[in-house]
Image (tube, helix red, strand yellow):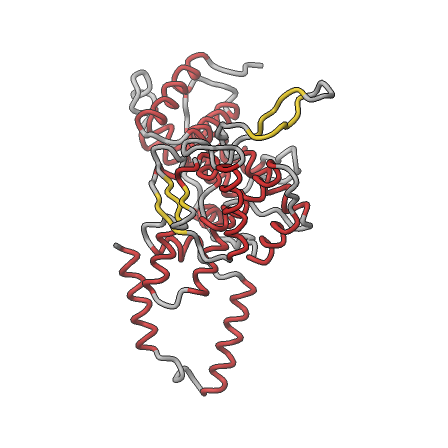
Amino acid sequence: MRKHHPENERVKRRYLQFLREAKRLSEPTVDHAAAAVAAFEESTGYRDFRRFHIEQAQRFKRVLDEHVCPANGKPLARATIHSRLIAMKAFLLWLADQPGYRSRIRYSDAEYFNPSGKDGRIAKAARERPVPTLEQIRHVLAMMPTKTDIERRDRAIIASTILTGARDNAIASLSLKHIDMEQRTLFQDAREVRTKRAKTIYSHFFPVGEDIEAIVFEWVALLKDRHLFGPDDPLFPATQVALGDTGQFEAVGLSRKHWQNANTIRRIFREAFEAAGLSYFNPHSFRRTLAALGERVCTTPEAFKAWSQNLGHDQVLTTFISYGGVSLRRQGEILEELRSGVAKSDGLRGLDEVALGRAVLSVLRQGKD
C-alpha cells in the first residue's frame, strides 16, 4: 500500500519552508502543521493534492471524529480535531495559490475544513487547571535531597522557578550574569535566553519567602565559590556524564554547558513532586501560582500591574484572564462570603460600588496600555 506521493512530498516541503521562513513560526508549530497534513494525506490514500475534492475534506472530518488513540482507547480531543482542521484549512489556502494547483483548487474549498461552531466552543472552552500552592512547593523543596551538587541544582531549579516566574526554557538557558542576587533581579535577555516570542524580560524576585530565596542564594554562591563559575557559565548547568567504575555511563557532576531544551527540567519537576507524594505539577503551573498569589496580596490596580509586568505580561488583562482564573473551590468560598454579607446588610449597600467601579476601570485602562 502506498505510503507517500512524490509530488505531495515536494509541495509539503515547500509549505513547511514557507511556515518557517516566511511566517516565522516556531518548530513545534511547524511540526503540528506537518502532522495535520500527513493525517489528511493518509485519509485520502496518499492521492495527489492536485486531485483534491471537497469530499476528501468531509471524509477527513469523519476520520478525525472516529479515530481512537491506541495508547488510551479514547477518541481524539475536540481541541486536537479543531487544531488539525484549522491547520489543513491554512494549508489548502496556501496550496490554492501555488503553480500547478491554482486551476484545480479554489480558495473556497478551504472552507470545507471549518470545524463546527459547537466543536470550536468545546475546543476553546476555559477549563480549570491544577495549580500548586506555596505550601505544596515548600513541601517538595523540603523533601528534596541535597547531598550532591546535582541534587542541590535540582532543588535550586524548583526554587528559582517560583521565585522568578521564569518559563522552563528560559531557566534552562540562563547564565550567571542574568541573575543579580544583591538587587534580587533576573534579566532574561532575549539575545541569550530562550524566552517566549524572544521577549526581553527584566523582573524582580517575587515575595514568596526568605526560605525559598535562601536556596537560590546558596546555589549561586556554590557555583561562584566552589566551582569558580563565571558570568557566561550556566546558572543551571547540564549534568556531566562519563564512564563510571561499572563501565556504564553515569552522572559524575556538573558540566559547564547549558541544556539544549527544557525536557530535563520537566523531568526534575515530575520526580520531585512524585517523591514528595504529590501529583505532578509542571514548571508553567508555578506562573499560575504566582498569578493567584498576586490577586491576594495586591491591594491596588497599580500593584497588580507591577506584579503582571514582573511575570513578563505587557497587558494586565493577560494575567487576569489567562493566568488569574479563580479556582472552583475559591469561587464557592467567595460566593458564600458574599451571601453572608448580603444577609447581614439586607442587600449590597455595604459595598462601595463607586470605589469598586473605579478600581475595575483603572485595571482595564492599564491593560490597554
Q: Nearer the viewer, residue 119 or 19?
A: 19
Is residue 333 shown left or right of residue 176?
right
Is residue 340 shown left or right of residue 245?
left
Residue 321 x %, y %: 41, 56
Q: Nearer the viewer, residue 117 or 254?
A: 254
What is the count of numbered marks? 0
Residue 124 x %, y %: 45, 48
Q: Quadrant of residue 90?
A: top left
Q: Residue at x 41, y 20 (%)?
A: 12
Residue 194 x %, y %: 41, 35
The quadrant of the rendering that contains the C terminus is bottom left
Q: Residue at x 63, y 21 (%)?
A: 242
The quadrant of the rendering that contains the N terminus is top right
Q: Is residue 151 above or below residue 292?
A: above
Residue 152 x %, y %: 59, 41
| Most distant residue in the top direction | 6
Q: Nearer the viewer, residue 132 or 147?
A: 147
| Most distant residue in the front direction | 225
Q: Nearer the viewer, residue 233 or 81?
A: 233
Is residue 363 shown left or right of residue 239?
left
Q: Residue at x 40, y 35 (%)?
A: 193
Q: Is residue 332 above or below residue 117?
A: below
Is residue 183 shown left or right of residue 2?
left
